[in-house]
Image (cartoon, helix red, strand yellow):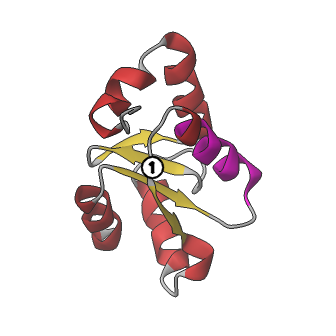
Amino acid sequence: MEKVVKLASENGILIFSKSTCCLCYAVQILFQELRVHPRVHEIDHDPEGKEIEKALLRMGCNGPVPAVFIGGKLVGSTNEVMSLHLSGSLIPLLKPYQASLS
């Protein structure tokens, strides 16, 4: 769990993902559309991936991936992210991390 907390605190937006997960990809595309560039940590490419997966479940993530952290706090998985987006609550959370349109 220590590695999860460390990575989450060091990155404004962090997505724990698996390279073969279509829901992870959907969340990443949503964030790109909203002009944010999260750090994506592919746990299937990490030797500690199984431990990270267990830690994410212990932290309360519904499924191990995608697990989205914003500002060091666990937001949740796809359902939580999409619910926040549909309710209009996601963009205010992302605002500090959005790229400007110049």
| Image position of 72 (left or right of 46) | left
Q: Which residue is mark 1?
A: 37
Q: Which residue does the image show at 68% across and 51% down from the upper left?
A: 25
Q: Where is the C terminus found, in terms of image quarters?
A: top left
> Viewer-proximal residue, 2 or 101?
101
Q: In the displayed structure, does residue 33 sit left or right of residue 74?
A: right
Residue at the image position 44 percent from the left and 52 percent from the top: 38
Query: In the displayed structure, would residue 6 be above or below residue 96?
Result: below
Residue 47, position in %: x, y?
52, 87
64 sits to left or right of 19: left
Which residue is at a point 60% across and 36% down the rendered structure image? 30
Residue 97, image x, y percentages = 32, 40
Amino acid type shown at disc 1: His
Query: Mark 1: which secondary structure?
Result: loop
Q: Give above or below for 34 relative to 8.
A: above
Q: Does the magenta run of residues contain 28?
A: yes
68 and 59: which one is in front? 68
Which range of residues does the magenta coloring cover? 21-31
Judge the density around disc 1: few (<14), some (14-19), many (≥20) Cα neighbours within 10 Å: some
- Name the spot of residue 98 as percent of width and height, x first: 37, 36
Q: Residue at x 55, y 42 (%)?
A: 32
Q: Main secondary structure of the magenta part?
A: helix
In the rendered image, the vertical position of residue 8 relative to residue 13, given as above or below: below
Tag count in the figure? 1
Q: With 99 as the anchor, is 68 left or right in this view?
A: right
Q: Is 24 contained in the magenta span?
A: yes
Quadrant showing the N terminus: bottom left
Q: Residue furthest front?
A: 102
Residue 26, how many percent across, how many down?
A: 68, 43
